[in-house]
């Protein structure tokens, strides 16, 4: 990634935007009715301060047309989602529709805040708040290390608190008839004060607005409910299953779930009624909650209301003792155990 993304040629707009025909309209089932705030014309990309590529724990090969940068705007940290110069008309259309989708969702304390867009000139930019502790998975891995800056510590009480926040965002989505479909630590962002906010919303937009088919992605299988693995329709309880896996990730400080089971054998494993292994630092109350979320039959899983009660009760009685792990995480081993496959190349930052 380079800063060159922010300096398109002078004729970029006339040649690449104005002349590009829009894609044929498709009637969406979830019509964006709210437009995101257009940043003032003087808020051009080159006026953002301290622009740098956003560091990530590891990057898998992707055909994504979006690059991520961190920057300063109005005396606060922001993340810039920048559409690359190579994007075609359909991709530009989708990029702006996703921003409209986020605006229509409306603000929620445990969803990342959409601050505005630059849509009247290239490059197209969506501006989001930055969550300084980045994604929860990398946060959990840093909690395995000694003397890290900024300080990083996970306790059982913090697990319940963060889980309550994610559950609140999930309930908000469900109330709008939306399924998340990919609840996992990589799709939770953590603020400077350890507030958890649910992300990974592009899949929600793609399925609901564009009617995109569900991806058969091997790297999602370890988090997917049995009914999805069996190619049956997903429902709100499918997100509850994944929420239980998220709790496992948190208490294990970022271990891959079902690490010993090949992804293509998961459905048979679940059909035999086998539970997730219990992490060494997991209390009886938390492990019982994880198992209740990960019941094979979707009707046996708790409702969002039941989950809220259990999380509140668990938070009150939880320990404040720091959870420890014996070793740093090996990303190579993690990718294999999480089902990404042996052939995936990756980059460590």
Image (cartoon, rainbow, N blue to C red):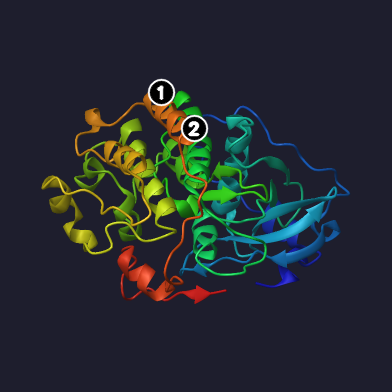
Q: Position of residue 335 (x, y in %)?
A: 37, 69
Residue position marked by numbered label 2 in the rendering: 316
Q: Residue at x 23, y 48 (%)?
A: 229
Q: Residue at x 38, y 54 (%)?
A: 281
Query: On the picture, is 56 further left or further right than 235?
Result: right
State which quarter of the image contains the N terminus: bottom right
Q: Position of residue 336 (x, y in %)?
A: 32, 70
User: Label 1 crowding class (10 Å Cα cut-off): few <14, some 14-19, many 20+?
Assistant: few
SS class of the residue under badge 2? Answer: helix
Query: On the picture, is 134 further left or further right than 29?
Result: right
On the question of residue 14 being in view, the answer is no
Query: On the picture, is 132 further left or further right than 120?
Result: left
Quarter residue 38 falls in:
top right
Give whichever of discs 2 and 1 has the lower sequence position: 1
170 versus 216 height, above or below: above
Camera-nearest residue between 85 and 35:
35
Q: Residue at x 32, y 44 (%)?
A: 287
Residue position marked by numbered label 1 in the rendering: 305
């Amino acid at each position: 990634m380079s800063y060159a993304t922010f300096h398109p040629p002078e004729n970029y707009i006339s040649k690449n935007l104005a002349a590009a025909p829009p894609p044929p309209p498709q009637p969406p089932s979830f019509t964006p009715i709210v437009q995101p705030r257009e940043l003032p014309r003087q808020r051009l990309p080159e006026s953002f301060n301290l622009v740098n590529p956003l560091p990530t724990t590891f990057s898998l090969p992707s055909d994504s047309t979006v690059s991520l940068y961190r920057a300063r705007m109005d005396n606060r940290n922001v993340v810039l989602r920048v559409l690359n110069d190579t994007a075609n008309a359909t991709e530009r259309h989708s990029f702006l529709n996703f921003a409209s989708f986020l605006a229509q969702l409306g603000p929620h304390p445990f969803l990342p805040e959409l601050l505005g867009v630059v849509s009247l000139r290239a490059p197209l930019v969506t501006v989001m708040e930055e969550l300084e502790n980045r994604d929860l998975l990398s946060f959990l891995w840093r909690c395995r290390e000694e003397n890290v800056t900024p300080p990083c510590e996970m306790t059982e009480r913090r697990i319940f608190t963060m889980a309550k926040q994610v559950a609140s965002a999930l309930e908000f989505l469900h109330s709008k008839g939306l399924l998340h479909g990919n609840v996992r630590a990589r799709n939770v962002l953590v603020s400077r004060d350890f507030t958890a906010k649910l992300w990974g919303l592009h899949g929600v937009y793609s399925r609901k607005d564009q009617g995109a088919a569900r991806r058969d992605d091997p790297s999602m299988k370890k988090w997917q409910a049995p009914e999805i693995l069996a190619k049956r329709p997903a429902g709100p309880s499918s997100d509850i299953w994944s929420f239980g896996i998220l709790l496992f990730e948190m208490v294990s400080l970022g271990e891959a779930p079902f690490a010993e089971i090949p992804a293509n054998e998961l459905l048979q494993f679940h059909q035999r009624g086998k539970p997730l292994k219990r992490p060494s630092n997991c209390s009886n109350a938390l492990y019982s909650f994880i198992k209740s979320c990960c019941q094979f039959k979707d009707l046996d899983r708790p409702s969002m209301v039941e989950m809220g009660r259990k999380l509140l009760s668990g938070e009150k009685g939880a320990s404040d003792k720091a959870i420890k792990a014996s070793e740093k995480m090996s990303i190579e081993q993690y990718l294999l155990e999480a089902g990404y496959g042996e052939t995936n190349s990756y980059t460590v930052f």
